[in-house]
Amino acid sequence: MEEKNENMAEAPTADASEQKPQQEGRPTFLTVLCILTFIGSGLSALSMLAVILLAGALSEMLSNIPGMGDIGGMGTGYFLITLLFAFVSLYGAIMMWKLKKMGFYLYSGANVLALFVPMVLAAGKFPVFGLIITALFIFLYALNLKHLE
């Protein structure tokens, strides 16, 4: 009987060693950041795609409002470029979810470049709130670089 008890005591040890890599995997904070990015970049990509697909109808509706012709004065090019950056940002977050360091660089680059799109294509407007959010997320992701390979 003692042999059975010893074998039973050894079995949980094997299970614990199998679970150990999962515990050392992605930190909870990185998981939360990635989920927030999935939501933000995903919604951004969906909204840009919807604007592009409905551009004709939106332009017609907005043309009745003074100063709002051609999709708020930004043109379809603005939305295409913003859509591209949203997809790259989303892909970067997916890579960070998989603990790949390249995801951080893709995410950071796409979001920094996205800040300048309104300046170039929308009459020099600069998104100050966007700068704050982008800087905050890049900083928070940078804190997790040690967990990425």
Image: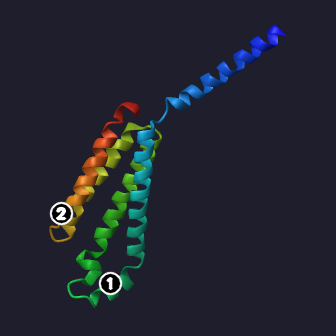
Residue 113 percent location from the top left of the image: 25, 55
Residue 86 percent location from the top left of the image: 37, 58
Return the residue found at the far bottom.
64
Residue lying at 34% horizontally and 47% vertically, measured from the top left: 106
Quarter of the figure with the N terminus: top right
Secondary element at tag 1: helix
Q: Which residue is mark 2?
A: 126
Q: Decide if residue 149 is in sight here.
A: no
What is the spatial separation of the Cα atoms under label 2 and label 1, in whole angstroms? 23 Å
Return the residue found at the far left.
124
In front here: 116 or 77? 116
* Horizontal relation, residue 106 to residue 118: left or right: right
Residue lying at 15% horizontally and 67% vertically, measured from the top left: 124
In front here: 34 or 114? 34
Residue lying at 43% horizontally and 46% vertically, measured from the top left: 32
Quarter of the figure with the C terminus: top left
> Amino acid type of disc 1?
Ser
Q: Which residue is mark 1?
A: 59
Q: Residues within 10 Å of mark 1 (few under 14, many from 20)?
A: some
* Horizontal relation, residue 62 to residue 17: left or right: left
